[in-house]
Image (spheres, grey):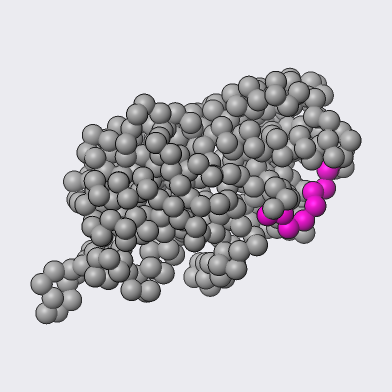
Amino acid sequence: MSRDRLSRRVFLKTAGAVAALGAVPSVGRAQAKEVKLGYILPVTGPLAFEAQLSLNGLQLAVDEINAAGGVKALGGAKLTLSPGDTQQKVELGNSEAARLIDQGVTVLIGPFSSLVAFSVRQVTEKNKTPFMLLAAVADNLTEGGLKYVFRVQPNGKAMATVTMMNIAEMAKAANLPLKRVAMMHEDGNFGTTMGNHVEAFGGQLGYSVVQKIPYSIKSPDFTAELSKVKASKPDLLVISGYYGDSKIIAETAAKLRIGVNALVGLANAAYSNPKFIADNRELTDQLFDGNYWHNPQSARAKAVFAAYEKRFNSTLTSHGVQAYTVIYVVKDALERAGSADRDKVRDALAKTNLTDHILPQDAIKFDDTGENVNASPALLQVQGGKPVVVGPARFAEAKPVFPVPKWHG
């Protein structure tokens, strides 16, 4: 048996046992009061690290809600998490989604990967089960007239266009107008979507994409690709990728003295990740990332960060923030629906107007396609060993350092 399969079996057995314990009726009660929420995440495989960060956010929110009395409109019903592992595989995503739906989950959450999400949404739609997208940003996930798909975080278009607008404004303020952009992106649905948006938006902001290079996240070396980037003499290198590949790209860019004004992650899984920064202090200093984030001005967000630190002995990340928020969006819908019925919860989700949250935006509201109409990324930069918000001004903690001298060698 492979290591991935063994670890997946252990994970499902352990997580299932925990969920089952939470569902055992109390002595003398006719029935357990619970609402099952299912998640599908790549808890084993190439994205296991990122998936665990999301899972931590889900668990923190569920435990907070249960400790505060559960879902009041349902007599204090407790939330339980039912686990599913996709291993970043479409067929597993479909089968795990179907299994959890058969087991009676009210809502399905996940699956991190846009590629897997695109297929799973057909399963949830067919079974009339609300599907809360988590971390998956590809625009087409909410297309096609689907009624049961909802996304709290910005989609690919919002992520790319708002980030590039923030970068362009920053460059203009530094008297270094953005003219030439190089783009590297992983070759799946997520990265391709981001690359296409960066290229298409150039006409509005007045820059041209001089290199657009797709790559496999399994590639062990990016010297050839980055040599092409360097030869094209861009003002900026934008990278949409996951943790491992983005790390290698930054390391190689530094060795090659890539010659740009900044390295900018776009929905990047590494460049604003506290672990990545802590493990690579010199490399990560003054990296940018346009990503979903929390509101650093929010007292509640600070309390959530402290609780996460105490619980997991690590810093809450952007993926954890989104997972945490998704649970509270679902809880709000359950309270207003007064029921765990999937259709009633779906209708309540569609009418969401949630102002009590920790995101850098106004109220969470969904349009007819299930997109959060106020969703917006923050522009982050690593300063002093931590990611800080440098844009938009409404949420900024610090001024950006731009251009970044070290990338010129």
Q: Which residue is drawn at 44% across and 28% down?
A: 140
Q: Is residue 232 left or right of residue 103?
A: right
Q: Is residue 152 above or below residue 71?
A: above
Q: Is residue 294 above or below residue 125?
A: below
The answer to which of 31 and 98 lies nearer the viewer is: 31
Which image quarter holds the N terminus?
top left
Q: Which residue is drawn at 17% across and 71% down?
A: 25
Which image quarter holds the C terminus?
top right
Q: Report if residue 261 lies within the magenta region.
A: no
**Magenta stretch, main secondary structure class:** loop
Q: Residue at x 64, y 37 (%)?
A: 162
Q: Position of residue 137 (x, y in %)?
A: 50, 37
Residue 295 in sight in this render? yes
Q: Is residue 246 left or right of residue 117?
A: right
The answer to which of 391 and 307 lies nearer the viewer is: 391
Badge count: 0
The answer to which of 164 and 354 lies nearer the viewer is: 354
Q: Position of residue 286 (x, y in %)?
A: 77, 48
| Residue interval drawn in magenta | 395-404
Q: In this view, does 27 lie to the left or right of 284?
A: left
Q: Position of residue 328 (x, y in %)?
A: 41, 59
Residue 249 in sight in this render? no
Image quarter of residue 296: bottom right
Q: Which residue is drawn at 77% across and 59% down?
A: 384
Q: Where is residue 292 in the image (x, y as percent from the top left)?
A: 58, 47
Q: Is residue 141 left or right of residue 31?
A: right
